[in-house]
Amino acid sequence: MSTAKDEDSSDLSILIQSIATSCKYIQNCVRKMGLAKLGGEANTGQNVQGETQMKLDVVANDVFVGMLDTCKRCTVLVSEEIEDPVYCKPSNAGRYVCVFDPLDGSSNVDCGVSVGSIFGIYRATEKGVARAEDALQPGKCMVAAGYCMYGSYCNFVLTIGGHVHGFTLDPSLGEFILTHPKITVPKRGSIYSVNEGNTQFWDEGMKTYVERCKNQAEPRGARYIGSMVADIHRTLLYGGTFSYPSDRKHPDGKLRLLYECFPMAMIVEKAGGKASDGCGRILDIKPTSIHQRQGIHLGSVEDVDEIEECMKNARRASWDQGSRG
Ligand code: AHM
Ligand code: MG
């Protein structure tokens, strides 16, 4: 006799299977982009973020929404590309909520740089009942999170609350094969990753951290792809930090909390790393709107601790200065 728990986990695996199939489809489109005339901008204008939509953004979004609705395991979907939450058809409604960025880093796609898809899954309050507020749970309530990187190889990285595992797509089989079991982020790394073009907008804490990375006996290497999925994938495997801080140009950060920061924070934490807004845990944040932005630092525990320490010292120095008038 199957129990509620069995049903729950079989629903979750059907849902994740649907996401994996969407990712295989998108991977195919990315691989034959120029050939299939899928490169360049869509003629849809800008998306809800005020960013130009690429043809592949539209394709990837349609694939995710279509697959997640018809798999009959979700109530509400939130996509980077759609302004409002999507309510699954009542006849299709299940017990999960899925938030996703169907094609992250799409501004890189035309020049052949790695891009990816990111997703997070929550349990709905009530099976079959679509409530928008179910998509506004803190990141720590996610039951699963993952991403798929369309890079020099196609890797599907997943946690369902335990270890983080990576599966490589075998193109001859069309299947994801477990190649990176129990991914663990090194405690310390020798890489920092941030868009240094924004240095003039940073606060003193961020400036100090990056100066420290450069000015030590063994300077750390700088790596910045500009596709979060690829930058996080490298950070998971090699360690170090990836940051997109809030600054004067992006007072709330640039990356989106629900479908970029939360899933990546869960993956990094489950792999033994740390994800912080500079002073506290990303996964503890309670969202107030579905497309809100967030400053973030993730990676090796000791390196992220160092960022927090730089931020704390900078805050203390500015208070001291303020209190001295
Ligand atoms: P997107 O979701 O519109 O593709 O934007 C998110 C991307 C991330 O993948 C990446 O980390 C960041 O934007 C890069 O931003 P910038 O070009 O400002 O460095
Ligand atoms: Mg994105």
Image: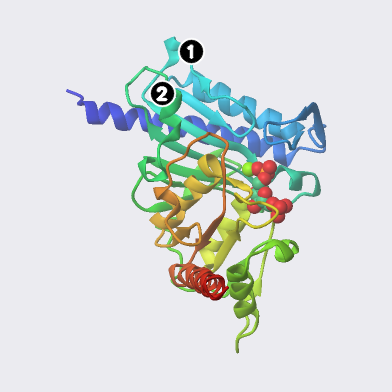
Q: Is residue 75 above or below residue 298?
A: above
Q: What is the x, y in percent for residue 28? A: 67, 36
Of the pair 221 and 199, the residue shown nearer to us:
199
Give the position of the N terminus as an image quadrant.
Answer: top left
Q: Residue furthest top?
A: 91
Q: What is the x, y in percent for residue 55? A: 76, 31
In the image: residue 26, left or right of residue 262: right
For ligand 2, tell me if the residue under mark 2 lies within 8 Å.
no
Of the pair 307 and 312, the residue shown nearer to us:
312
Residue 14 visible, this orientation: yes
| Residue 38 lies in quadrant | top right
Q: What is the x, y in percent for residue 205? A: 58, 70
The crowding category of the residue bearing disc 1, from other C-alpha atoms within 10 Å (few below 14, some 14 to 19, many at least 20), is: some
Of the pair 87 and 288, the residue shown nearer to us:
288
- Identified at 31% across, 33% down, the residue is 9
In the image: residue 63, left or right of residue 138: right
Dot 2 falls on a residue whose secondary structure is: loop
Q: Is residue 62 above or below residue 235?
A: above
Give the position of the C terminus as an image quadrant.
Answer: bottom right
Its colouring scheme is rainbow
Q: Amino acid at mark 2?
A: Arg
Alpha carbon separation for disc pair 2 and 1: 11 Å
The crowding category of the residue bearing disc 2, from other C-alpha atoms within 10 Å (few below 14, some 14 to 19, many at least 20), is: many
- Identified at 47% across, 31% down, the residue is 98
- Identified at 50% across, 25% down, the residue is 68
| Residue under numbered circle 2 | 73
| Residue under numbered circle 1 | 89
| Residue 65 lies in quadrant | top right
Which callout, 2 or 1, points to the residue nearer the camera? 1
- Identified at 81% across, 37% down, the residue is 39
